[in-house]
Image (cartoon, helix red, strand yellow):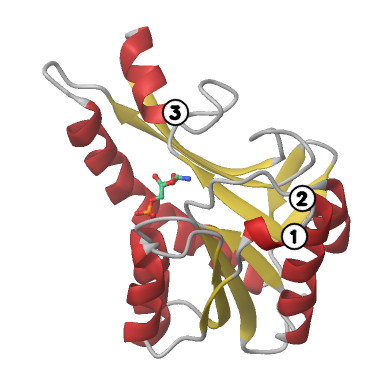
Amino acid sequence: MALPEPCRLGVLISGSGTNLENIARRIEEGSLPARIAVVISDVEGAYGLVRARRFGLEALFVDPGSFPDRASFDRELIRILEDHRVDLVVLAGYMRLVGPEFVAAFRNRVMNIHPALLPSFPGTSGVADALNYGVKVTGVTVHFVDEGLDTGPIILQEAVPVLPGDDEETLHQRIHEVEYRLYPEAIRYFCEGKLRVDGRRVEILG
Ligand code: GRF
């Protein structure tokens, strides 16, 4: 069943935030029935915070260094996200593993986008790893987040060819173009109540 509108998103970033900006733009244009309730960065200088504020979004830096461990940092994020009544947590270039408490607090309500076709090339250098391996096809994966590193149930995937002469930048650029289509699509399915998780499988209803 679709959530009562608007579907409230909490976006976690660590860097440039072009996916965040793309999602914010789709919402503004009216093609994504959601609203961004809060943006949180674990990196103080993340450019994504600047992008978020340009859209008039609440954008917070939470310093992991001021917490004794990951669990207490995660607890602070959970508190902020719950205060903002977030329905879905969207990881958009968030370079930190979320812990078991976080996953339990938002079970099947945390999404991540990964710049490779999982389960190939998980981790923080998926584009470079695919390129260095010499694959002819890589791609984009949107998945729910579980306790592992890029191991959660897969929602959407799309292939991106590796072209002769590609370097990390040119390949990542083409991967980004696919990400800008796939992430809003997956978020829209969630907000429309169309995603059903059954073990490792995600069914898209309708
Ligand atoms: C994206 O390629 C995403 O797949 C990965 O981190 C990158 C973030 O890019 N998780 P941006 O900050 O949205 O520009």
Q: Residue at x 21, y 35 (%)?
A: 169
Q: Residue at x 24, y 40 (%)?
A: 174
- Number of other residues with Cα within 10 Å of mark 1, as a class: few under 14, some 14 to 19, many 20 or more: some
Compared to 149, does 21 lie above or below? below
Q: Residue at x 35, y 23 (%)?
A: 128
Q: Are marks 3 and 2 in contact (CB under 8 Å)?
A: no
Local secondary structure at mark 1: loop
Q: For this rendering, which residue is in front, 104 or 99?
A: 99
Q: Are marks 1 and 2 in contact (CB under 8 Å)?
A: yes
Q: For this rendering, which residue is in front, 205 or 163?
A: 163
Image position, residue 67 (x, y; %): 74, 60
Q: Visible in this render: residue 121? A: yes
Disc nearest the viewer among 3 and 2: 2
Local secondary structure at mark 3: helix
Would you say the beta carbon of the disc 3 residue lies within 8 angstroms of ligand 1?
Answer: yes
Measure the alpha-carbon separation of dots 1 and 2.
7 Å
Q: Which residue is mark 1?
A: 67
Answer left or right for 51 relative to 125.
left
Name the image quarter holding the N terminus.
bottom right
Answer left or right for 90 relative to 99.
left
Q: Which residue is mark 3?
A: 126
Measure the alpha-carbon separation of dots 3 and 2.
24 Å
Local secondary structure at mark 2: helix
Name the image quarter holding the C terminus.
bottom right
Could you tell which of marks 3 and 2 lies nearer the N-terminus? 2
Disc nearest the viewer among 1 and 2: 1
Residue 70 numbered mark, or none: 2
